[in-house]
Amino acid sequence: MKYLHTMIRISNIEKSLHFFCDGLGLKETRRVENEKGRFTLIFLAAPNDEKAEIELTYNWDGDQLGEGSRNFGHLAYRVENIYDTCQRLLKLGFVINRPPRDGHMAFVKSPDNISIEILQEGNLDLKEPWLSMQNVGTW
């Protein structure tokens, strides 16, 4: 058996790529446009780790994502510096729902309400403003 990918539905390609690529740092590995099926599949992976992809599925005629996007749990990524990653996401206008107060774990949501867990590789010293930052909404 071989792991292939995790699929999540999206409502806006540009907003989703802005979040996953500009915010989290993932890279597009390939794209499939299916005119007959009226959908686009965009595969993303972390740099130098194309074995674990996510598939963004965009239905051209719209998609009813609903609350929690069909009860999807979350995606998780390990990063070299959680503070830098969270700061970059904040600068791009994304809310850090669960700040990395412990220097190890944070949660943010994609434009389609998918929870993304960000985990620090190793541990960092506790640091402001993260240490005092409160949770926002759900994560």
Image (tube, rainbow, N blue to C red):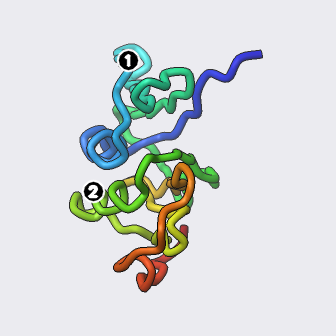
Q: What element carries label 2?
A: helix
Front residue (pair 66, 98): 98
Q: Is residue 70 above or below residue 58?
A: below
Q: What element carries label 1?
A: strand
Q: Please state, as top left, top right, bottom left or bottom right, where the N terminus lies in the image.
A: top right
Between the residue at mark 2 and the residue at mark 1, the CA separation in whole angstroms equals 25 Å
Q: In this view, does 35 lie above or below 19?
A: above
Name which residue type carries label 2: Arg
Quarter of the rendering containing residue 131: bottom left
Left or right of residue 5: residue 61: left
Q: Position of residue 81 (x, y in %)?
A: 41, 53
2 or 1: mark nearer the eye: 2
Quarter of the rendering containing residue 94: bottom left
Front residue (pair 101, 58): 101
Q: Name the residue under label 2.
A: 88
Q: Name the mark on residue 30.
A: 1
Front residue (pair 36, 86): 86
Q: Which residue is drawn at 44% across and 29% down?
A: 45
Neighbour tally class for label 2: few under 14, some 14-19, many 20 plus, Cα within 10 Å: some
Q: Which residue is drawn at 55% across and 21% down?
A: 51
Q: Please state, as top left, top right, bottom left or bottom right, where the C terminus lies in the image.
A: bottom right
